[in-house]
Image (cartoon, coloured by chain):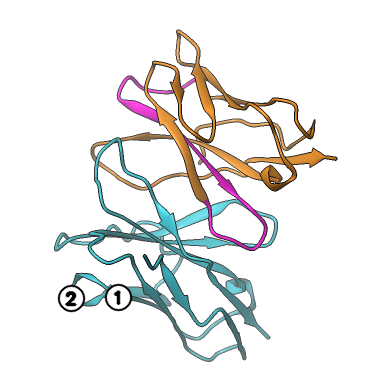
Chain colours: A orange, B cyan
Amino acid sequence: DAKTTQPPSMDCAEGRAANLPCNHSTISGNEYVYWYRQIHSQGPQYIIHGLKNNETNEMASLIITEDRKSSTLILPHATLRDTAVYYCIVRAYSGTYKYIFGTGTRLKVLA
Amino acid sequence: GAGVSQSPSNKVTEKGKDVELRCDPISGHTALYWYRQSLGQGLEFLIYFQGNSAPDKSGLPSDRFSAERTGGSVSTLTIQRTQQEDSAVYLCASSLVQGPNEKLFFGSGTQLSVL
């Protein structure tokens, strides 16, 4: 079973920041938070990951709460091409290596 | 460089037939994953290969499903005696770096339709 909870869908106006929440209240100390997205008819694409510190790269920012029970993916200036399903995944880097994908959040960026 | 390549992109078969799906990972990537995605659903883990280690087959849904990876590169997922519920997109991913900084690179998948 997926260890994360995400809203099934969200809308965002083009040019505005898209804030996608994820709840992972049962996360363990050695588990990282990963975000992937899947644009229609393509395989998922890596976005960002983190353990407990906030992270930023060219695609997005990841904000993880201090208790690590939730996180938010931020797309600072959403474009129409960001319309996709966004998956939040928690995963330990030892032992089993399989990623457990949930059903994600379907983000629709509106013109 | 080339990404993960999967073939065929589409496969239509009759119930009861066997099918083989192929995945060419990115050159040099030691880890390879197979996932299945039914219409409107998330990704379901099937199997994971890492180098010469025994594969993690814990996600294979039945003994009709099997996979192999020859020479640490190309992988083939075989479904025997296909059923209609096997209809889905089968996705392959590979990765180079193990551990917390691992990034999966996915192919575009094989759309399998069992009639």
Magenta stretch: includes residue B115: no
Query: Residue B108: x, y in percent?
Result: 53, 66
Residue placed under numbered mark 1 in the picture: B74
Residue drawn at 51 percent across, 55 percent down = B44
Residue drawn at 41 percent across, 55 percent down = B105
Residue drawn at 39 percent across, 51 percent down = B104
Residue drawn at 64 percent across, 53 percent down = A39
From the viewer's side, name the closer residue of B62 and A107. Answer: A107
Query: Residue B82: x, y in percent?
Result: 54, 83
**Most common SS among magenta residues:** loop
Residue B93 visible in image: yes
Pointer 2 indicates a residue of which chain?
B
Secondary structure beneath dot 2 equals helix
Pointer 1 indicates a residue of which chain?
B
Residue placed under numbered mark 2 in the picture: B71
Tell me where the magenta segment starts and ends, as one range: A25-44
The count of marks equals 2
Please determine whether, in this image, residue B20 is positioned above or below residue A108.
Answer: below
Query: Looking at the picture, which amino acid does disc 2 mark?
Result: Gly
Magenta stretch: includes residue A40: yes
As measured in the structure, the alpha-carbon distance from the residue carrying label 2 to the one carrying label 1 is 7 Å
